[in-house]
């Protein structure tokens, strides 16, 4: 009985092994033998199933095995997209840079620039990244807007540039608040000045002016504090931040200046770092 049982196990094992080998022989050559059109369709199906690596492998076959096919350049863009969807941003950027250099007049060239910008932009909120990635995103988005101003990609890029600027301004505000709380007032002034000078159209401008008023008062620079509060009141008269600045000045016995443009032009000048 034991020997018969062992014989059955041996036969079953051989059968399963043969099936596995057979499957490999059948499944392997299918992709290898596909023509460009079939490979391209296969890669699209893989992307729809979120199998991005398999899709990129199929697309690479088109590039290497059929370099003169009309689908070769499309395969490059699709491969970059697969890398992008798989968060392999550096790989996507490499593919896109090559595509841009080799296909400057291509039909998809605007999209190539857009996808490259997205590869940077989508990394902005990664806490492991520094502000350099945001600056690269803004540069790539601005380049897209300059080159292809009348495209739908440029319209979306404009919105993303504004969001990126808000992000950079927010970073400066975080550092400025940090210095302000620790009484490093001169360092705080530099940060808030940068927001006002470089990112004055962002949502952080009102608070930056208020914090700058606080920092100047802490440094004993009363006239600078008055001027800053006046600028805040002139540009944002109904702002809660202006109300706070007004109160801060009153609390230390300083009379807030009237927020008129003539006085602001006379008193306000770029603070020296």
Image: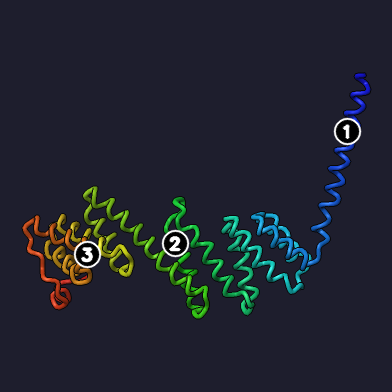
Identify the image's colour scheme: rainbow, by chain, secondary structure or one colour.
rainbow
* Viewer-nearest of discs 3 and 2: 3
Residue depicted at 24% across the width and 52% down the height? 180
Label 1 secondary element:
helix
Name the image quarter holding residue 198: bottom left
Element at badge 3?
loop
Q: For the C terminus, which image quadrant? A: bottom left
Determine whether label 2 and label 1 are within 8 Å by CB.
Answer: no
Query: Which residue is the site of mark 1?
Result: 12
Residue lying at 9% horizontally and 59% vertically, measured from the top left: 250
Q: Nearer the viewer, mark 2 or mark 1?
A: 1
Labels 3 and 2: the sequence-earlier one: 2
Q: Earlier in the sequence, mark 3 or mark 1?
A: 1
The disc placed on residue 239 is: 3
- Tell me the residue that label 2 is attached to: 134
Q: Quadrant of residue 16?
A: top right
């Amino acid at each position: 009985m034991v020997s018969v049982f062992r014989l059955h196990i041996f036969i079953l094992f051989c059968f399963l092994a043969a099936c596995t080998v057979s499957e490999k022989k059948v499944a392997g050559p299918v992709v290898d033998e596909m023509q460009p059109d079939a490979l391209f369709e296969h890669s699209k199906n893989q992307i729809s199933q979120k199998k991005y690596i398999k899709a990129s492998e199929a697309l690479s076959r088109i590039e290497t095995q059929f370099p003169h096919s009309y689908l070769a350049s499309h395969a490059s863009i699709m491969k970059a997209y697969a890398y992008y969807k798989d968060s392999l941003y550096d790989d996507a950027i490499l593919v896109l840079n090559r595509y841009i250099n080799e296909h400057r007049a291509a039909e998809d060239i605007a999209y190539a620039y857009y996808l490259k910008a997205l590869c940077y932009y989508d990394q902005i909120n990664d806490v492991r990244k520094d502000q350099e990635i945001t600056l690269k995103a803004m540069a790539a988005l601005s380049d897209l807007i300059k080159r292809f101003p009348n495209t739908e990609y440029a319209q979306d890029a404009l919105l993303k540039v504004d969001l990126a600027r808000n992000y950079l301004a927010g970073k400066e505000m975080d550092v400025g608040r940090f210095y302000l709380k620790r009484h490093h007032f001169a360092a705080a002034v530099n940060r808030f000045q940068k927001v006002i000078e470089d990112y004055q159209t962002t949502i952080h401008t009102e608070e930056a002016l208020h914090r700058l008023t606080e920092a100047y008062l802490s440094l004993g620079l009363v006239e600078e504090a008055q001027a800053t509060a006046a600028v805040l009141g002139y540009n944002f008269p109904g702002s809660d931040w202006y109300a706070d600045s007004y109160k801060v000045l009153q609390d230390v016995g300083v009379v807030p200046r009237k927020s008129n443009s003539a006085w602001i032009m006379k008193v306000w000048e770029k603070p020296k770092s």
